[in-house]
Image (cartoon, helix red, strand yellow):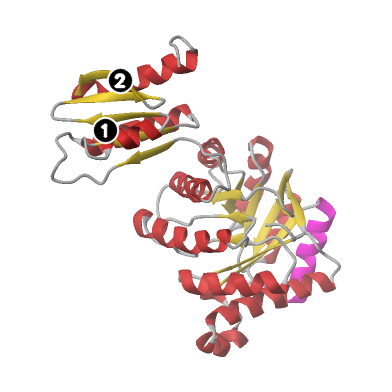
Amino acid sequence: MTGRLQVDVGGVPVGGGAPVVVQSMTNTRTDDVEATLGQIRALATAGAKIVRVAVPDRVSAEAVSLLVSQSPVPLIADVHFDHSLAVAAVQAGAAGVRVNPGNIGGREEMRAVVDAARERGAVIRVGVNSGSLQRDLRGLEERDPAGALVESAVRHCAVLEDMGFGRIKVSAKSSSPLITIAANRRLSERVPYPLHLGLTEAGTRWAGSVRSAVALGVLLEEGIGDTIRVSLTGDPLEEVRVALEILRTLGLAPRGPRVISCPTCGRTRIDLEPLALEVERRLEELGLELEVAVMGCVVNGPGEARKADFGIAGGEGEGVVFSEGRPVRKVREADLVEALFDEIALRRQGLVDC
């Protein structure tokens, strides 16, 4: 988002007009270094520029140095309740630490975290969640839940500012998309720091993706938000895929592979869903910035396929492959996907006239 301060998170610029950064969080035990590193690398390959790891105990904090030494992306330590774990994680090389004002302790505990972050050049994210607000904000939360989130975040930023610390990111999250939207609109007017967007406990892959797309899509389209996480129950790789699709849909990230496919109807005479899923999977593996149409009948199929870079349109047991707007092959249904990717490979290699 333009107009906001920029912070450097382990070499990744956040805020100040930099591209919106996708984050995720590992769900392995942090002290299982091999498993956690494997997940960090997979998330980075999928498109995450920053990865967060939970630091719930001393052994996890001690593992941070090993993770940092081998991670391809900056790591953020997620700490609750024990400020000394945040200090230890920063001293172990974490590029930043996420703390929650509702449970991290008082000023002196926070000062110790600030001193460590200042010494190491780390960033502190003030991460406010609706489920863990300070006790004195509970009454305001009942009347104005978005306002309570904003008040907590602003209050804690002021504590850091009083300590002369400005390497700050801020987030205000709720499991409600509407509360999250309202809180971040107001927060963007109250603080100059980069904003991290997301829903807390967004839900399962399907429902959480929809809720996150609504909340993050509205805010990002309004120019609010510098880094995002889609919090889903399950494989964190899905978080990255959904987050990138949100950014691509809004034109905030390179297009990447895109499959457009029809919803099917009574005219469909081809088993379309497995075709579309297989095309999507293979495009993602190749990482090509292509739009491919997978259409199921002759009504909209040929027209949509002609508008895409490549496409297939099915009939009864057969289909047509399109390339750059022209039909180039008619093949059996069983051969459609292979014929499509053969054509993509030929065009990329320049072996046929375009």
Q: Earlier in the sequence, mark 2 or mark 1?
A: 1
Disc number placed over residue 206 in the picture, else none: none
Counting from the top left corner in percent of width and height, residue 116 is at 80, 58
Q: Is residue 188 left or right of residue 343?
A: right
Residue range (magenta): 105-120
> Dot 1: few (<14), some (14–19), or many (≥20) neighbours within 10 Å?
many
Task: Name the secondary structure under disc 2.
Answer: helix
In the image, residue 196 lies in the stretch drawn in magenta? no
Residues 269 and 201: in front is 269
Image quadrant where one finds the C terminus = top left
Of residues 298 and 225, the one drawn nearer to the viewer in this rendering? 298
What type is the residue that disc 1 sits on?
A: Leu
Frontmost residue, 205 versus 101? 205
Q: Residues within 10 Å of mark 2 (few under 14, many from 20)?
A: few
In the image, which disc is placed on residue 338?
2
Q: Give the x, y percent position of residue 259.
A: 38, 38
Q: Is residue 147 above or below residue 196?
A: below
Disc 2 marks a residue whose amino acid type is Glu
Disc number at residue 275?
1
Residue located at (18% from left, 35% from top) = 271
Q: Is residue 3 visible?
A: yes
Say whether residue 64 is left or right of residue 244: right
